[in-house]
Amino acid sequence: MKHSKYIHQIRTAREHFLGNGEVPDGLLPESIHRSWERCIKTGLPIDRIPEFEPASATALNELREMNVQLLAQSQAEMENLHTHITGTQSMVILGDSEGTILHAIGDPDFMSKAERVALQPGVSWREDVTGTNAIGTALVEKTPVFVMGAEHYVERNAFLNCSASPIIDPYGGVIGVLDISGDHRQPQEHTMALVRMSAQMIENRLFNGNFLSDVTIRFHSRAEFIGTLWEGIAVFSADGKLKATNRSGAFQLGIKQNAYLNMQFESLFEITLESFLDSIKKKTPYLSQRLTLHNGVQLYAKADAGSLIHAEKTSVHVPSGSPVKQPLPLDLLKHGDIHVTKVIEKAKLAIGHDLPILIEGETGTGKEMLAKAIHQSGSRKHGTFVAINCAAIPEGLIESELFGHEEGAFTGSRRRGAIGRVQQAHGGTLFLDEVGEMPLALQARLLRVIQEREVSPLGSSKAISVDIAIISATNCRLKEKVIRGEFREDLYYRLNGLRLKLPALRERSDLKAIIHVILKDKLNKPDVIIDDEALAVMQAHPWRGNVRQLEHVLRSAMIFMEGNVIRLEHLPEDFLEDAESEIYSADFRSDTKSAKITNIADAEALLIKNALAQHRGNVTAVASELGVSRATVYRKAKRLGIK
């Protein structure tokens, strides 16, 4: 249906409603039609401006405290969405389960325009209050909803195009709603898909740190999808009872998300939970294991690090002779690079001493993986590893997240209060990622916790003893922040009992081994190989995203791979473009006109060199000029000795 024709249909529906008081069938999408009919039943006027009174700053803060977990897990996804819509006259909105806006980010000009219709934090956009709109209607319909322009029931909201998706908690209940609202004149082709994917990612994040005494399993019918937003997640109690699952998990298991009371692990799979965890212990922890459903469907599954505590309680049977000495998890990170080996050997010295450790390294170098390995290699391995990203939690919420709050600390907050991350880590390890982003006021409180080994939840005068090891990580030089006055010097020295510096991937000599480990342990493709041309490009790449970028490149390449060999043409376009300028731009700036030509190979080499110099290493442009494929340029350059 053409856009102009549909706009005419909406106008016809509105005119018919104003004249006859009902909405004719077939003119509006079913979800919009149902919404208009609900609005009619509530007596909501279609042409009157509703009166809105945004919540006060105090009330809004209390509402945010009630939804602290939702906000914490949504922040990163909202920021990511914002990067996609920057400059499009749009904004990203997070609402609670009742449709009240908790947080919004977007283009300043459009946000000012949106405030004229009260599209701002502290205002309820429930359908029965504001009429048909993506936020309120998605909550009623319990499904993603797109509301275009004049589909909004209230006329003054017709300048908006809105895409919203409800956010479902691990138990199947609606916990909030994610929305992108923008100018109706802007293109909206991919907005709904972005919102749906981001909401699904938030749902998956809600499982993090919330089932510390249970077994959390992540699975998919394709091993490479574990760790993506399409993975299934299921939580089982220690005795094997299913407690929670995400939407993808319920679909793959063939059950309803919120209708699995008393369902046991062995009623789903052809194995007991104890046997599954035992199989994990006997193999590399990061390698997925196969699980077979009773209907014969096979899944690949991994257990979260905290869940492996259960596997540790099951000893490995050794038939005879001396017991087998299991390698430390730290040793499993060694792949041949001397710098990483030195870091690991240095980390071993701290095991058993509860020495605070500070890990420095660029984003994606594996700081959290190293922290987990340190935790799992020491005497605290049976305790909980609690990770918190100090940069991903709004400043006003990080104090409650770290230290918890007492019953009644906030008006309308959860009756029983909440335990903070520090207390959750009792007996285990607290991992503070991006610690350099922690607000100064919170740094003072954290310093007291480290010094006194006690924590006081907000609203409580009672001090609770905590026994924790602390590992911090940062992608900046924390010492430089101290010099600039952005980080407390006394806290810096409290955290820096042992400083470990992880090298960037471009500085490591074990790229080939790391590729093999990722293919085998993370992607479950141990038979896949990289051909020489692709490997040469990968070895010369700057890898600004480090190991995390490498994993994404391999995942992408496997989508286009034929057979079990990753070739140059399978690598992502943007990756090759980065590699081209890095590899060739510095090598071909010298004058090549005086080169001596004695045979066809010399002429071919000079032709390629001149083209590369002219296009400053852009292999795509060279291939186009010479009328050959990019892979041919790489191949000939290699054969002719052009580095």
Image (cartoon, rainbow, N blue to C red):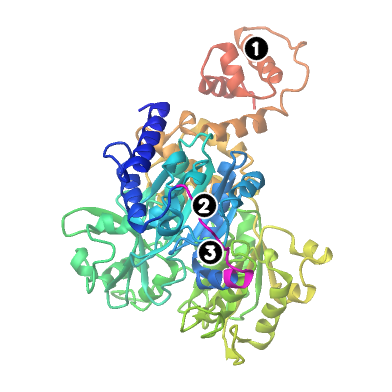
| Mark found first going from the N terminus, 1 or 3 | 3
Residue drawn 53% across the image and 66% down it = 330
Between 75 and 209, which is closer to the camera in this rendering? 75
Query: Horizontal and vertical percent for residue 606?
Result: 67, 13
Residue type at the position of mark 2: Ile
Q: Secondary structure at mark 1?
A: helix
For label 2, count other residues whose C-alpha is less than 10 Å away and answer few (under 14), some (14-19) or many (20+).
Answer: few
Q: Nearer the viewer, mark 1 or mark 3?
A: 3
Residue 188 in view in this figure: yes
> Percent position (x, y) of residue 541?
61, 38
Q: Tell me the CA gap for discs 2 and 3.
A: 30 Å
Q: Where does label 2 land, which residue?
A: 49
| Residue highlighted by disc 1 | 607
Q: Nearer the viewer, residue 18 or 111?
A: 18
Q: Nearer the viewer, mark 2 or mark 1?
A: 2
Label 1 to label 3: alpha-carbon separation: 58 Å
Q: Is residue 59 above or below residue 31?
A: below
